[in-house]
Image: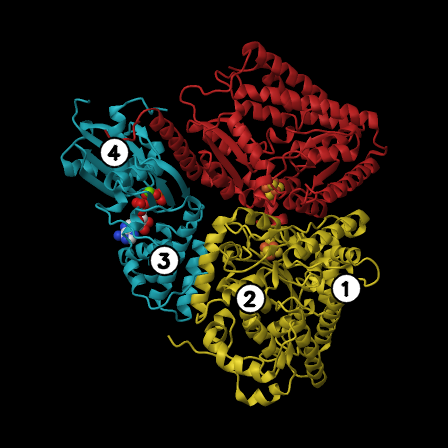
Chain colours: A cyan, B yellow, C red
Amino acid sequence: MSINGNYFAGVDVGSLAAKSVILKDGEIFATGLVPSGVNSVESGLNALNLALESAGLKQEDLTYIVGTGYGRVSAPYANKAVTEITCHAKGANYLHPTVRTIIDMGGQDCKAIRIDQDGAVVDFAMNDKCAAGTGRFLEVMAGVFKVELKDLGAIALSATDTVPMSSTCTVFAESETISLVARGEKPENILNGIHHSIANRIAGLFSRVGIESDVFFSGGVAKNSGMKSAIEQALKVTIVKPEIDPQLIGALGAAVIARNFSKKEGLWAA
Amino acid sequence: MGKQLFRYSEANKEKFLESDNITFNDGSTVSPEEIWHYLTEEAPAKYPSAFEVNLYQGNRGSRDETLPTSLKTRYLGLTFSARMEKAKDNGKSIAFIQGGQAVDPYTAADTIALRPGLVNQWNNGLEYGNDINKENLRRKKSKEKAFHDMSFEACQTGGYEHVQAGDLRIDVIAPYTVLRCSDISYGVEAHRHGPNKNVKLLNVDYPLRFQADKPWAIEYFAKNLRRLVNTLDEVTGRKTSENDLLKAIKLHNTGRRLGTELAELWWSADVPPTNSDDRASMVSLGNLEVHGDVQASLSVLKEAKKFIAERVKNGVKGHAVADNPKRLFILGSCVGINGSRSEDAGAIVVGRDDQWSHCSSLVEEVGDPFYNLAKATLEYPYEQSIEKRAQWTIEQIKKSRADGVIFIHNWGCNTQAAISRPIVDIIKRETGIPTYIHERDLHGLRDEQEQNRVNAFVEML
Amino acid sequence: MSVKTLDVIRKRLEERPDELRRARENGLKVVGWVGYNVPEEIIHALGFIPVRIAIGGDDRLVEIGARYASSKTCVFIREIVGAFAENQDPYIQQTDILAFDATCLQNYRAAEVIEYFFKKDVVVLAVPRNFHLDEAKEYFAHEANEFTRLLEERAGAPLDSARLAESVALYNDIRKTLKSIYTFQASKDNVISWEEVYDLIQAGDLLDKREYLSLLTQTLDELKERQHHPVIASDDGDCRIFLSGSLIPRGDRKLIGIIRSVGGRIVGDDLWSGILPHLDLDIKEISPAGVALGYLNRTPHAALPYLDLESDRRLKKLQERLSEFKAQGVIYHTLRYCDPFTFKAKETKNVLAKSGIPLLEIHTEYAGSDYEAMKTRVEAFVEMIKIKSEIAEEQGVLVDA
Ligand SMILES: Nc1ncnc2c1ncn2[C@@H]1O[C@H](COP(=O)(O)OP(=O)(O)OP(=O)(O)O)[C@@H](O)[C@H]1O
Ligand code: SF4
Ligand code: SF4
Ligand SMILES: [Mg+2]
């Protein structure tokens, strides 16, 4: 065991947000969340420093750091890089050992992950490269309706009808939305349609990997109540209530893996 | 939410009641009285989506109410699902086929043949009370799953999900693997891993490359047709004879002739005697397969000719058609443009190559019916080399006096997309008529982008 | 670890376009073939120089191809069409005649489009979809004769049976030698990598066949000298990947590079740009039909449908090879709009899952924009396999103490 103590960190630099989690004695000790900038090294460090500051720690105090997310390839501060798929699996398993299925919706990717009782990935699928059905897409829609991102889901939930979207491409969907508004459809009904259309795409993704309870919803979009409800309907499941901010799950998983790595250094070194 | 529904006006009722009965395959008939009742009472309650006044999805607030055929094809369309259910309850066998083919051998083998569009129609009609939004949502939802079960680059899924779930009682998947369609043979193959083990599978293997000039290719396709009939017989337990096929060919030739005559009559008029959708639904009766009932299609078709002749003679213009509309000829596969919205933009659709290609291919009635049918099938203009297909298309464009040509294909329709440019090139070169290539977005819902482009093209004309 | 003959082959490939140009100046004709069931021996025996046109990985050409063949044609065909439009590829420049087959309809459309736009002399071999039925074989025999007749017209001489026999013998030797070489790459302490063997196989698409055979023989001798009895088994830390799906032609090394970069080791493939076309080719009769049927009777290309899962020889072959090469996972590569392979991805995955082999589908095109996304998937897949074997070995890192 390292002399530095028992601090382990996970840093998840995603396409839209950088997240960090510091673990101490198996407990979440501090967290950080910042938007991803162009420089992913900086974004990762910002997120990490935020957590370090709030914990009153310095980087040297950390025993082991695992980097994940798109920024993992350029994370000189990390001892090891692991993909976010493995990390989300581990993070969800750590908090909720009964979870067998994870939906991660982040800024540009949507992932369907199946795990076993150890939190090891048994199968996964990701959306096609198209952005429709991701956080970025929802942000564009929030922009179209000039509403706050955090209110988007609640607005969709207040709908009285569901207007289907025909376009599957972000660019087209944006202009289609504008024409739907022009022909007098209500914003909440259109937004409801958008949420359901994304949920159906996710259901499609799961037809490739299957679903097993319990189901966990991670990533920033998991904070969107409309999305959560639409997915529950489309998949006919109940989503587990997260114990922490679901956007941090990837970073948490990375921190857990950091702890495991430090115990058995080299075992899984490629 | 009280969406506005269209209602047929009582003012036209009397005239409609003077028209003929529709006679079905099983010998039963339905009177105009019953049809009227269905269209004004029963159907609006069952299928509000079909009556919803929604300019964007192609349902205008008015119809060609003085054209009885318009009401009758609508009636057949709306009762389709119920009729298929009834046919199944009565032990009739149903096959899934391809859009670009005729159905003579299926008729001979006493089997209803449904192309992808009809399979979807059957499924859509199984649920009552939906408005347009609900119906579109339902369709998108099941497609999304099917796309993942097959391929998310499939243009359409041919009801795969419903056949496999047993919701649609289809006994056999046996399409011609015509070149028109890139996905069809993979779509057939996909059924092998579904849960429904009862559905029989067969690809009726359509040869390529100058096929009509190769005797061995015709022989091969004739053998495929025999195999098809045997497969259909395995389902029905009947034994289809050569004579049965000959009878079916004769019947279908009658339909094809009538369909062709009707189209030519329509083209002969100075002003379009009907709107785009009515034209299309009448001409497509010629293949006799469109409503899943050969006799019903035939009886409506026969009568239609009479009405059109009358309109042409009196110079009557179809309902909601603009004065001097721009005449569009539509090429491509499976999909068409939105008729009524294009009319609002000052255009009219005067023809399509899809369906028309095989409607205009008559089958020789003397000699081995399998060979004759094979030969005629390998001669489908749509299936020929680029140059030959283009020349045939040009003839049709000229006959229909089109002002513009739109090649539209589905997202994922690889084999049509691949030659859209060469075909359109030749047409432009030889006729000077403006052309436009359009791709329908995935999931096949019509959208604003598409209409904007079509409208812009019409304005350009 | 380098094998010396491979350097010779690389050099010979560089010289090849010039060599073809000189051969053509001396009156020989080059037949460029594109497809999956083109019976190359017939082309060879007629005195043509056969060259396989299979290139990929260049997004710019794909864009150009889309102008002619639409953006909805598979990426591979778009690139081929684009390459003909541009006419810069040294092999395309040297072709006099093109031979296509209609195994895949998109390949067939490419023939039509290239013929129309670039005024090429194109010969097409039609291929039946019901390939396993007797009547289909009979029909295909006719098509093979027709194909031969069209080539004879262009050769100005009939096909000579003795020459065909020679060509068949030569090609049989090539196939046999390739198969032996292939075993070495999958072995423990291998001196040749799968990647090198893959390039070696593709060199055969372009080089003179006799010379190619002698280079293969040299390679095999070299391998035998260094590694007497190759044993197919894992080295430490291997994550043994089998590559399946749409072809990966020369010029496209994106996925292969990614697999290696994240610590995966490719140990086998059943790609139509790899070893598969060289397997199970049994020519029973020296005639155009005999040769063509030999091709058709191989493990069939994915564009030819099997309507009954039980009878599917493709899947059987895949399973056999997975165990032969001791693969731990399959990366199933599908190109954008390649329906033959894309339609089968899910089913193949389900079938293999029954024997505990995971499958990852990578759906991609030639643009570099999905590089990171692909890498994440492949890396996660490799992690998944490694963790799985670790957990199996001892309760590994991912299990909390
Ligand atoms: N309160 C909120 N309500 C709704 N959505 C939110 C909220 N907070 C963040 N999001 C969404 O979460 C997304 C970012 O999530 P996350 O941090 O998981 O993505 P990422 O890891 O950067 O992306 P990826 O995993 O695709 O690379 C944003 O696109 C935003 O739309
Ligand atoms: S869109 Fe094209 S590929 Fe699809 S079913 Fe229609 S014809 Fe076939
Ligand atoms: S098999 Fe796939 S990659 Fe090859 S030509 Fe056909 S669609 Fe293209
Ligand atoms: Mg993320």
Q: Where does the C terminus of chain C fall, quadrant-wise?
A: top left
Q: Compare residues C400 and A180 and report the one nearer the observer.
A: C400
Asked if ligand 4 lies within 8 A of label 4, the reply is no
Q: Is there CB contact under 8 Å for labels 2 and 1?
A: no
State which mark lies toward you, 2 or 3: 2
Q: Amino acid at mark 1?
A: Leu
Marking on residue A195: 3
Q: Quadrant of ligand 4?
A: top left
Q: Is residue A36 left or right of residue B396?
A: left
**Disc 3 from disc 1: Cα separation:** 51 Å
Please tell me whether mark 4 sits on a helix, a strand or a loop: helix
**Disc 4 from disc 3: Cα separation:** 32 Å
Q: Is there CB contact under 8 Å for labels 2 and 3?
A: no
**Disc 2 from disc 3: Cα separation:** 39 Å
Marking on residue A256: 4
Q: Residue at x 27, y 29 (%)?
A: A77
> From the viewer's perspective, is residue B308 above or below residue A144?
below
Q: Is there CB contact under 8 Å for labels 2 and 4?
A: no
Q: Compare residues C61 and A168 and report the one nearer the observer.
A: A168
Q: Which residue is mark 1?
A: B362
> From the viewer's perspective, is residue B28 above or below residue C312?
below
| Chain containing the residue with disc 2 | B
Residue C262 placement (x, y as % from top left): 41, 29
Residue B44 placement (x, y as % from top left): 48, 77
Q: Which residue is mark 2?
A: B89
